[in-house]
Every structure is written in C-alpha cells, then in structure tokens.
Amino acid sequence: MPERSPTADSAGFDVVVVGSGFGGSVVANRLALAGQRVLVLERGPWRDSLPVRSMGIERRAPFPYGARAVTHLLHSMHLGPLDLRLNRSGMYELFVFPGLKVMVGSAVGGGSHAYGGLLEPPQNPALWQGRHPDFDPASIEPYYRKVIADMGGVRLSRAHAVPQSVWTQLPDAPERRCRAAEPQPHMALLLPSAPAEAGQTITWGSGVQRQYCAFDGDSFLGSRGGAKASVDFVYLAPVLGKGATVRDLAQVTRIQRARPVDGDGYVVHFLDRATGSAAHVQARRVVVAAGTMNTLRLLFASVRGPAGLAPMPALGRGFSANGDLMGVWHRKSATVSSFASTPSQGEFRIAGHESATCGVGGFPGFQTLPLPGVVKRRLEKLFFIYGMGMDSGDASVACERGRLSVDYDQRREPVYDELRAAFRALATESGERCWAIGKPFTVHPVGGARLGADAGHGVVDHRGEIHGNPGLFVADGAALPGAVGGPPSVTIAAWAHHVADGMAHSA
C-alpha cells in the first residue's frame, strides 16, 4: 500500500489537503470516498504504532516514550523572537507568547495522537448561531454523532475495568460539591471489559490491528498499541491508495494562485523535510487543515507577494484559547499510581461553578521517561487537572516575517477566575493541594480564520471556502467561530465533514 507520492508535482490530483489531523484526515476520507483524487501533505511523520505498522507503512518515527523523549518530544519551540527547530520528527510544537502558551502536535494524524481521547459535542450553545445567514446550525449536529461512532467512542462508566476513575477519585456523598459528571463524555479508547483483556490485540475497522488499553501508556505521549483511536488509522487507512495519497514530512510553505496559462486553481509549495528539496503541486481545490496555528501562519504567508491570495482582512481576528487551564492535584492519599491510568479518568462538576468543564487524568507512560527515581515517586502522586470554558474569542493573531504573535490577556477573560475558583474548591474539599499552572496553556487553539458572513467579519463562508478565494477552504479549528467550551476534536471533525461533503456535492 503506497504511503506517499514520489512525483506529487505531476500526479494530477483533484484536491490537495494540507494537514492530516481531525480536519485534514476527515476531508481526505470523505473526498476520496466520493471519487476524488486527494493528496495529503503533512509536515510530520507517520508514528510507529501497531495500527500504522499493520497498514504497511515503512517510514515511521517513534513516540516520545523512554529515552526517545529527549529527541522526539519537541519538534520546535517559538520563544518570542527565538525560533528553535529541534527535530523534524518531534511530536510537539511549543509557542510561548506574553499572555499564553500554546502546544500543538506534529504527525500524520495530527493532534489525535496527543489528545486525551475525549469525544463530546461543543459545550457552547451559541457556537454556530448567527455566524452566516446561509449556515444552519442544525445541519452540523448529525456529524457529531458520526464522528463519535467513527472513533469508536464509548461512555466511561463505573462498570469499566479501569484502575481508577473520577468515581474513585471523587466518591459520591450528598454533602460533596465536587462530583462526577453525569453523563460522562465518550472516550475513544479500547477499554477492556475484564482485566484479562488488557493489552490483547484485535483487528478493527478497515483491518488494522489495535490493542486494548493496558493502562501503561496511550497518553499524551501517543498510543503505541492503538488503544486510543487516532485519525491516521480511523480515516486515512480506509482510503490510502484508494483515492488518497499521503506525503509525510512535507512542510507546506506557501499557496499561490495559479497563472492563467496554467489553468485555474492553486499552486502549493512545500519542502520535503526528508531530502531538503523544494517541490510544488497544483490543484483546482485546496483545503487548509494544518492545525490552527500553522493554518494561520500559512495563510498569512500566502497573502503576500506576487500571485498571493486575495486579501483576508479578518485573518487573525477572533482567536480563542478555548478557556484552557491546566492544573496539578497532589494526592498524597492516592493508593494507585497516576502511571496506572487512562489519560482522562473522567469529568467532574463543582457546585457553584457549573459553567466550567473540569476533569482529572493520570500520567500513563511517564514512568518510562529518563527521570530520577525520586522524581518518578513524586509524579506517581500527582494527577492532571484540566479545565475548559468559553473565553470571549476576542483575541487576535498577527504574523511578521513568518513569526506569529498572539494578543491574549487572561485578565480580560472571566473564565479563568471561574476555573481557578473551581480548582480551589477541589483542594478545599479533598484536603489535598491543587494548583493551576501559571498563565493559560492551551492545546486547543481555535479561530483566527473563522466563519463569517463576509470578508469583513470572517475568513471563510458557510461552506468553509475563503472569501474572495474560490476553491480554497479551511477545515480545521482555525475556522471555528468561537470557543467550544470543552474538547474540540468532535467539533473540528464535524466541521470538516460539513466542508468535505459540500465540496463533494459541488465537484
């Protein structure tokens, strides 16, 4: 089964998709199934998971477990004026801005390797309301259910054979303010129904192999056995070599309008990171889904210079950090190590702070890292607390000489006061220290190329097509018109379904 095109600049594709996360993989899947010839350009590598090996992919990069964390944890770091390019096969890209830190994934499958496996529709009831006169918010709702089903989502319950959960962390009691949420979100994890199933291998979906969760990995460092569903094998495997071609380690640098003598469409320029050579491909339609930060960077780079894209006056406006706030819960009383866990143990609600989405998780796989024993023993008692909510979405992103800057001030966002108060309530009720990590640290940036009725109010229209640039679409979190208020994976994938199905019908 082919994993990449050796002559992408002359292969005659109908659509080029930039990026392969929850947006790009869905678009590639839907368009290939509709009979389109699709090329996916992804700057990151295929990850060395059991499902990817079973797909026959030969060129793979490891997840950052064990000593590989030293070399493969970080792809790059952007610290003010300093850009550090560390490893083309690194898993994470880190941005540090004065008011915000942002971390995004880099791989075939994008952020689906790094997420906690939570699947839920948007918590913001006004997310799609009034954004475009031709967009019916109800039209996207069926896609939420489809994405959850495609990813094999199951609701976490007390019946699952897990070492610890939100119910064991926060046992029921009438007087408690902090209680497990009901219902729990779906989780894209192969959870064993009995301890004996942990680690067992099965054949799933389009014939890929996966292992049941053994509670020793499947975390933010990736899922080596495929217990945590990722879009590389959920959406790309069924169409790979059957309408879709994936070219990994292909860093897209610019999108230009094609010259009239060359026909309509766009020319996509990219750098082959494996060889260092530059290449390009032309297609009538292009879908940008490189993840919010890199989609914005690419669009900023592409509106400038000869043959640049038509102006996008709203580009960079309407950026949101999704109200993300991370914290740590030091549980001296814990009888089960935080290493023996699912990445998320479930969500909880706190009386008086119901607008906040909060959850607890562990650090499975972190026991493999090259850390001193004393540090690991301390880490075993630490649990990951996360909060999400609805920030204003009024922040902005700019780009100067290829470097992004974000104007984000948490002091203008009441959601962070709410989340910090929720964390303090957890500490008071549990009697164990819980604290938030400094400035907001988001792994869910959205917006900046948002849906809007015209070019003055947004970058894309109701079909995901960029105003003034026919045939050019945005199908990832950058197009979302506001904070989701919870994990955005389902919302991004649903938007990508909407965009792709509209493209298929207009082909």
Image: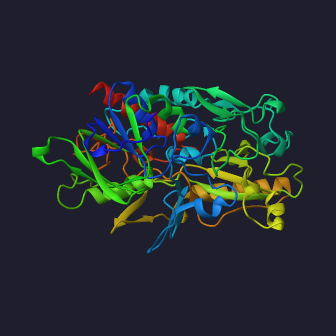
> Which image quadrant: the C terminus?
top left
Residue 170 visible in rendering = no
Q: Position of residue 414 (x, y in %)?
A: 57, 57
Q: Viewer-proximal residue, 173 or 229?
A: 229
The residue at the point 54 percent across, 63 percent down is: 101
The residue at the point 80 percent across, 62 percent down is: 376
The answer to which image quadrant residue 24 occupies is top left
* Drawn side of residue 422 relative to residue 207, left or right: right
Q: Position of residue 424 (x, y in %)?
A: 75, 58
| Total numbered badges shown on the rendered structure | 0
Q: Viewer-proximal residue, 353 or 27?
A: 27
* Drawn side of residue 323 relative to residue 342, left or right: left
Residue 99 visible in rendering = yes
The answer to which image quadrant residue 162 occupies is top right
Q: Position of residue 26 (x, y in %)?
A: 45, 35
* Drawn side of residue 169 relative to residue 489, left or right: right
Q: Position of residue 78 (x, y in %)?
A: 48, 68
Q: Which residue lies most toward the left here?
A: 261
| Snapshot colouring | rainbow
